[in-house]
Image (cartoon, helix red, strand yellow):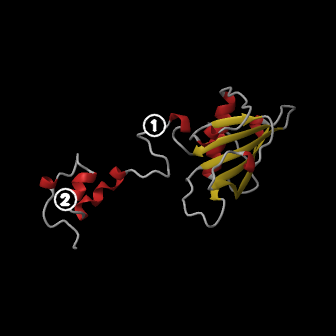
Amino acid sequence: MNMQVQSVDKIQPEHLRVVDVLLTAISSGITLSCHITADVWKESNINIFNHPLLAKDIPSCDIWRWNQTKSRKTLTLPTHDLTITLHKLIPRKRRQDITQTVPNHKLWYCVLRYSTSKPSMYILWCERGHTQTRTESTEETNSEDEVNVQDYSFLAEFMEPTQASQLWPETHSPESHSPGTNSPK
């Protein structure tokens, strides 16, 4: 989208990408959201609100919460009579003693203020998140905390052939195991 964007400091490519997504969403006639759901984590999901939001109100998890990075950017779009403030949010552990890793999500909270009498809009856009909602998950798709033994089949060459064939019978039969590939005992 061709747009004229102004800022008091340097505009990063990620900021232009966010503005492009926002303008496309607004022009497509997306409807207002009533409340925030965990679908906010779904990649490319856009929610528009008519009231301000707080990071603590955005659904998170037991081990992590949304944290606003220091990256806050205010941009002016004179051709749209619009000022946009961008806030980048990423997951952060709730406590230092938590050993689980947090997801690599990136959520943008955007405040759009028109210089005309149009009301302000508050938008959440998930740039990087789950590729499907929790309700769409299937047994074949693992959650972040599940371990799939198939992911470790590369270790078969370091195991006894009979053990490898028990874990991965479809790909590692004892007969097909080449000698000398076991790890030393």
Residue identified by numbered label 1: 138
In this picture, residue 25 sits left or right of residue 148: right
Q: CA distance from mark 1 to mark 2?
A: 32 Å
Q: Position of residue 44 (x, y in %)?
A: 58, 39
Q: Residue at x 15, y 57 (%)?
A: 177
In this picture, residue 49 sits left or right of residue 173: right
Q: Amino acid at mark 2?
A: Pro
Q: Position of residue 77 (x, y in %)?
A: 75, 41
Q: Residue furthest bottom?
A: 185
Q: Nearer the viewer, residue 106 or 74?
A: 106
Q: Position of residue 37 (x, y in %)?
A: 66, 38
In this picture, residue 70 sits left or right of residue 119: left
Question: Where, quadrant-wise, is the C terminus in this rendering?
Answer: bottom left
Q: Indicate the quadrant where residue 9 lies.
A: bottom right
Q: Residue at x 85, y 37 (%)?
A: 115
Query: In the image, is residue 129 above or below residue 153?
Result: above
Q: Which mark is residue 161?
A: 2
Q: Which mark is residue 128?
A: none
